[in-house]
Image (cartoon, rainbow, N blue to C red):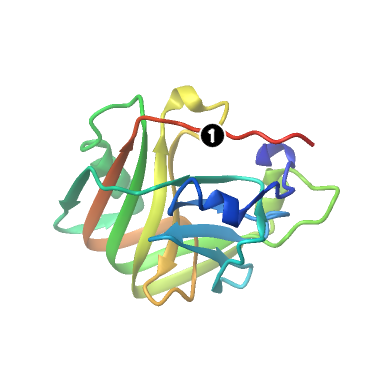
Amino acid sequence: KLDDGEMEGMLSVGDLKKHGDFGIGTFDGLDGEMVAVDGEFFQVDYQGESKNVNEKVKTPFAMVTFFESDKSIRLTGDFNYKLLKTTIDEILPSRDIIYAIKITGEYQYLQTRSVPKQEKPYPSLREVVKQQKIFNFKDIKGTAVGFWVPKYMKDINVPGYHFHFITEDKTSGGHVLEMQITDPTIHVDFNTDLHLSLFDD
């Protein structure tokens, strides 16, 4: 678990792509934030800069799926992160499955973070987050990529919403902390199957 300092990459991005074209995660030693959308995998580094990921790079944690939208909705109005999540809650048909969620639109404000690569012996995730670097964007287009996980899966993943972001020009992004977006389009993929891979030390 990342929470316990298990940050060594075990699965290559090339192998990860066999399981999905959309998702989030991190890299060996917690080296930045992973954003995967439309089959492209990006790494947002500690400077907030994004680049395409070499397929040989490894990950200690990722969530991916082959994204197929089961429900799409265009909202009207202005939404901050809290209100947007509450609104999405109302369109999810069940609280028992995982949802992959893609949010597109023009963000009046967006706040993200990334963290620096860690060296062994790896610290806890809590300690790493203390080193996070915050990035603030204004009037920017892009895509938020994420998942909603039910509470009963708390032992294998953090329940609730988790989003990463990539700008429209694919040059920046990070782990989403806050947002303000107008008239967002939301695509939701209902995931009723779960494939969990665990790796030995």
Q: Is residue 198 left or right of residue 111?
A: right
Q: Is residue 14 visible?
A: yes
Quarter-of-image position of residue 199 = top right
Q: Residue 91 location, x and y as percent?
A: 21, 38
User: In the picture provided, is 175 more to the left or to the right than 76?
Assistant: right
Q: Nearer the viewer, residue 136 or 196?
A: 196
Farthest right residue? 121
Q: Position of residue 72 (x, y in %)?
A: 19, 49
Give percent across and percent down for residue 89. Answer: 27, 37
Q: Position of residue 82 (x, y in %)?
A: 34, 47
Instruction: Give the residue type at disc 1.
Output: Asn
| Residue receiving disc 1 | 157
Regarding mark 1 in the picture, which secondary structure is present there? loop
Where on the picture, by quarter, is residue 182?
A: bottom left
Q: Would you say residue 83 is visible in this rendering?
A: no
Closer to the camera in the image, 125 or 30: 30
The answer to whether 73 appears left or right of 61 in the picture is left
- Placement of 71 over or under 29, stated as above or below: above
Farthest-out residue, top: 152
Q: Out of 5 and 21, give the one closest to the viewer.
A: 21
Quarter occupied by residue 191:
top left
Which quarter of the rendering shows the N terminus?
top right
| Above or below: residue 91 compared with residue 23 | above
Tell me the crowding category of disc 1: few under 14, some 14 to 19, or many 20 or more residues within 10 angstroms, Cα based.
Answer: few
Residue 20 lies left or right of residue 143; in this view the side is right
